[in-house]
Image (tube, rainbow, N blue to C red):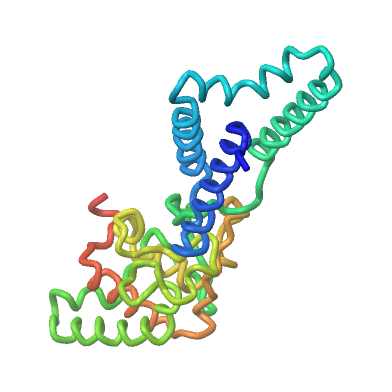
């Protein structure tokens, strides 16, 4: 049975759409951004139409159902129904594109929420503008002790943090795909390389619930680690993060 070219074009485009969704979403487990999917489908539609209308006869066969629908007076009712469906579908797509969404974008948090000037943790108040890692000084004063502190920070990390942030600190831990936004990729130059250690202390100690209101609804799944780790363990983990990635924490004096 010969399939009409217009129907064949619709089926082929639908197959490509399903392929992109399954390949990226199911096989690669990487949801494809809508803008990228739109671009892929644009070229797919163009390619399918070019193939099916490559010859004059093919182009006429492809367009004949549309021409018949538009020009045949006996198909006025069908024409109005089709136009109504197309208009309603276009309106639905437009609404889906412009309606407000409370879902976080499926990407890393590239915009860091502004920290408060002071933060409360461990029943104390910290001034984030002056707060420093108490162990950072040992990098120059006692390199052997500093190395041991980094090692201990690594132990804390792999006992508590790598499940989400990954064993390579790239945000690809075992549970990473269950979160939105994804866990921070510390290897990315846009994360800890741009931050002070006091910022990391704030985010680790107070977790997602410690985010300011303006950060919502991009909530974080970060636990309130002050409930599980000591203050010293958090500072050691921060040492480990910068040592492993090779980044230097920013400081108010230098920046």
Q: In the image, 143: left or right of 185?
A: left
The image shows residue 152, relative to residue 241, as above or below, that is below
Q: Position of residue 121 (x, y in %)?
A: 51, 74
Q: In the image, 165: left or right of 35?
A: left
Q: Position of residue 63 (x, y in %)?
A: 60, 22
In the image, 175 versus 155, the foreground residue is 175
| Quadrant the N terminus occupies | top right
Q: Residue at x 50, y 70 (%)?
A: 125
The image shows residue 54, relative to residue 28, as above or below, that is above
Q: Quadrant of residue 249?
A: bottom left
Q: Position of residue 171 (x, y in %)?
A: 39, 67
Q: Residue at x 59, y 43 (%)?
A: 11
Q: Residue at x 47, y 30 (%)?
A: 46
In the image, 122 versus 154, the foreground residue is 154
Q: In the image, 174: left or right of 248?
A: right
Q: Position of residue 96 (x, y in %)?
A: 68, 40
The image shows residue 148, relative to residue 119, as above or below, that is below
Q: Residue furthest front?
A: 1
């Amino acid at each position: 049975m010969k399939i009409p070219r217009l129907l064949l074009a619709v089926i082929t485009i639908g197959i490509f759409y399903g392929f992109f969704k399954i390949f990226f979403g199911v096989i690669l487990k990487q949801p494809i951004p809508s803008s990228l999917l739109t671009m892929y489908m644009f070229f797919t539609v163009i390619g399918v139409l070019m193939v099916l209308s490559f010859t004059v006869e093919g182009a006429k066969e492809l367009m004949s159902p549309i021409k018949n629908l538009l020009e045949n007076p006996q198909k006025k009712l069908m024409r109005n129904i089709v136009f109504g469906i197309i208009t309603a579908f276009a309106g639905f797509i437009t609404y889906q594109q412009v309606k407000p969404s409370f879902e976080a974008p499926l990407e890393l948090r590239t915009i860091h929420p502004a920290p408060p000037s002071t933060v409360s943790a461990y029943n104390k108040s910290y001034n984030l503008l002056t707060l420093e890692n108490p162990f950072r000084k040992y990098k120059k004063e006692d390199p052997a002790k500093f190395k041991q502190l980094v090692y201990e920070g690594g132990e804390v990390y792999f006992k508590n943090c790598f499940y989400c942030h990954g064993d390579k600190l790239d945000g690809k831990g075992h549970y990473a795909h269950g979160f939105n936004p994804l866990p921070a990729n510390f290897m990315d130059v846009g994360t800890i390389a741009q931050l002070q250690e006091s910022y990391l202390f704030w985010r680790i100690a107070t977790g997602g619930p410690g985010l300011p209101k303006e950060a919502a609804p991009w909530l974080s799944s970060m636990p309130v680690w002050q409930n599980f780790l000591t203050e010293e363990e958090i500072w050691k983990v921060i040492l480990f993060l910068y040592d492993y990635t090779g980044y230097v924490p920013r400081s108010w004096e230098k920046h």
